[in-house]
């Protein structure tokens, strides 16, 4: 589904010509079958004016095709005439990078607000019914119910780029946090692993969550009372019971399946829904398909990741499973007595949304920093073209959307928030600044810290942070990748930026951009290998 529509003349003119011809034929058929023919005055043929219009449209189409063929044959820079064209290139200036970026943004990147709004509203209705059904069902699984059972809290929290106004291309993927309600007798003591020196950098953004007695509870009696819950959802780590992300995720997926069976019949008239379990490495995905009887204007197929979340206070959530630690070995090999199934990720979407809102309030009118972030994501996608699946996956993990958002925040807050020069007229310059900053981070000339975790988190600009975040160690988002992988990514990023005009012409924008080919020295076939 395209999110921006343009008139395709190659389809429009033949369609109009065919329609007019069909009308002429229908007119003559109806006129001939109407019995006696009534002669028009002065002997004129009543069908001639309509036929003449159809012939003129056909001639216009033929002339348009001939003009396009002539321009492709004789314009400078075409392979037919080489460098000996009678037309000098200076009479046909190439569009600037800002024009190319603007055109590519409008045709390939920007989301239709109408379609995005419908998609978010549809997701909100479906997920809301599912969560309410899950809350009403109670808790299946290892604990049938009662005071020591996990349960849905009854609400959900929409997070991600679609709700921060920088999603690109298609509104078909969403992330939703589903908060869980812990038993009243259970309290949590979260701890960041950012200060664990024996752990690989990939785990510095993870948390472990020990169980503790609530205030006023007796230790021995509390352990006996919580034994059922601890046996069903906890594991032993360094002699203490810790909430297991793996066991909670397994219960969550089972509970969602039961809840979906409850609401599936009531949703049949609006859409078709199915749930794909994510196993132990991914949260489950709810697929929403349009119903055949749905004649709405936005018939979209959407995938919604439903992420189990445990609220720690101040809009901070632990989520399962944690981000994938790609550069290290299996989770069972963690040092220091840690267990992989006890690791949680942390979601700070609310703090990041507050930071973006704070920046937007202080930005000059017409600031384009969110537009730059969208184009930076599009640049990443263009750079992945031509890569084999393994290399493309590695490229996408290094330049993840969260890394790119953190790059934007770091640049905006480097000299105060936000500096001047982010107007639309400087779109290309600001995008180049982001690319150069990211390349410097990849080449290990500087670190790229998480914008919330740690005492120096940028989100401290918007107010005090929860204690669990302030006490977390700083997390370098790129430290988990080895030097060779980062250098390859930096080289490809620079190569993609240098070939950006060519890529924008080849993969997006209106067809008139094809009339302005790149210089002959820059023409290549496909994607050449990057320099080491």
Image (cartoon, grey):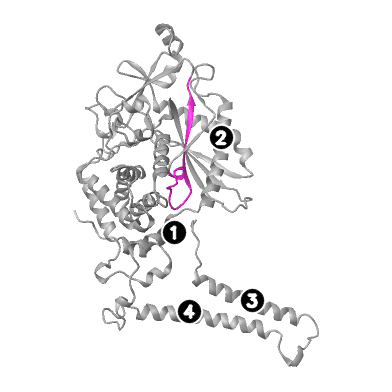
Q: Which residue is denoted by mark 1 in the rendering? A: 106
From this viewpoint, which residue is outermost toward the right? 36
Label number found at residue 130: 2
Q: Earlier in the sequence, mark 3 or mark 4?
A: 3
Q: Earlier in the sequence, mark 2 or mark 4?
A: 4
> In the image, 371: left or right of 32?
left
Q: CA distance from mark 3 to mark 4?
A: 22 Å
Q: Nearer the viewer, mark 1 or mark 3?
A: 1
Label number found at residue 64: 4
Rendering quarter of residue 66: bottom left
The answer to whether residue 386 is visible is no
Residue 465 percent across, percent down from the top left: 37, 29
- Measured along the vertical axis of the image, is residue 24 above or below residue 418? below
3 and 4 marks in contact (CB < 8 Å):
no
1 and 3 marks in contact (CB < 8 Å):
no
In the image, 339 versus 217, the foreground residue is 217
Q: Which residue is denoted by mark 3 in the rendering? A: 22
2 and 4 marks in contact (CB < 8 Å):
no
**Magenta segment:** 161-182
Q: Earlier in the sequence, mark 4 or mark 1?
A: 4
Q: Earlier in the sequence, mark 1 or mark 3?
A: 3
């Amino acid at each position: 589904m395209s999110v921006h529509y343009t008139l395709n003349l190659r389809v429009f003119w033949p369609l109009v010509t065919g329609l007019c011809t069909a009308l002429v034929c229908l007119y003559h058929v109806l006129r001939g079958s109407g019995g006696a023919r009534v002669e028009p005055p002065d002997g004129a043929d009543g069908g001639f004016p309509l036929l003449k219009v159809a012939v003129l449209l056909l001639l216009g189409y033929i002339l348009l095709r001939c003009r396009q063929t002539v321009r492709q044959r004789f314009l400078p820079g075409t392979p037919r005439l080489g460098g000996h064209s009678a037309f000098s290139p200076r009479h046909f200036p190439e569009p600037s990078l800002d024009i190319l970026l603007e055109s590519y943004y409008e045709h390939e990147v920007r989301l239709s607000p109408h379609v995005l709004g419908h998609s978010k509203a549809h997701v909100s209705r479906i997920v809301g019914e599912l969560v309410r059904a899950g809350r009403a069902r109670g808790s299946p699984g290892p604990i049938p119910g009662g005071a020591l059972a996990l349960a849905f809290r009854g609400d959900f929290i929409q997070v991600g780029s679609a709700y921060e106004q920088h999603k690109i291309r298609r509104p078909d993927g969403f992330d939703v946090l589903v908060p869980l309600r812990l038993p009243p007798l259970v309290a949590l003591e979260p701890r960041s692993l950012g200060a664990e020196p024996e752990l690989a950098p990939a785990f510095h953004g993870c948390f472990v969550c020990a169980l503790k007695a609530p205030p006023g509870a007796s230790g021995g009696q509390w352990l006996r009372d919580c034994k059922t819950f601890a046996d069903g959802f906890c594991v032993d780590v360094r002699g203490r019971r810790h909430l297991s992300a793996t066991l909670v995720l397994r219960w969550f997926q089972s509970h969602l399946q039961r809840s979906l069976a409850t609401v599936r019949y009531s949703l049949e008239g609006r859409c078709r829904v199915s749930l794909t379990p994510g196993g132990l490495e991914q949260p489950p995905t709810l697929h929403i398909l349009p119903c055949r009887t749905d004649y709405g204007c936005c018939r979209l197929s959407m995938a919604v990741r439903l992420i189990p979340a445990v609220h720690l206070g101040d809009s901070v959530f632990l989520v399962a499973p944690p981000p994938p630690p790609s550069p290290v070995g299996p989770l069972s090999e963690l040092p220091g007595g840690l267990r992989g199934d006890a690791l949680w990720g942390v979601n700070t979407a609310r703090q990041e949304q507050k930071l973006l809102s704070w920046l937007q309030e202080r930005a000059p009118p017409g600031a384009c920093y969110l537009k730059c972030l969208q184009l930076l994501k599009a640049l990443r996608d263009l750079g992945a073209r031509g890569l084999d699946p393994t290399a493309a996956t590695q490229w996408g993990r290094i330049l993840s959307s969260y890394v790119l958002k953190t790059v934007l925040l770091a640049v905006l807050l480097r000299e105060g928030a936000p500096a001047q020069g982010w107007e639309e007229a400087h779109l290309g310059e600001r995008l180049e600044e982001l690319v150069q900053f990211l390349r410097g981070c990849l080449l290990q000339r500087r670190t790229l810290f998480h914008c919330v975790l740690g005492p120096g988190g940028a989100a401290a600009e918007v107010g005090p942070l929860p204690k669990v975040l302030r006490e977390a160690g700083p997390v370098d988002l790129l430290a988990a990748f080895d030097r060779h992988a980062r250098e390859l990514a930096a080289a490809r990023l620079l190569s993609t930026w240098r070939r950006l005009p060519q890529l924008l012409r080849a993969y997006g924008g209106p067809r008139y951009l094809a009339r302005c080919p790149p210089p002959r020295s820059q023409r290549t076939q496909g994607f050449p290998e990057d320099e080491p």
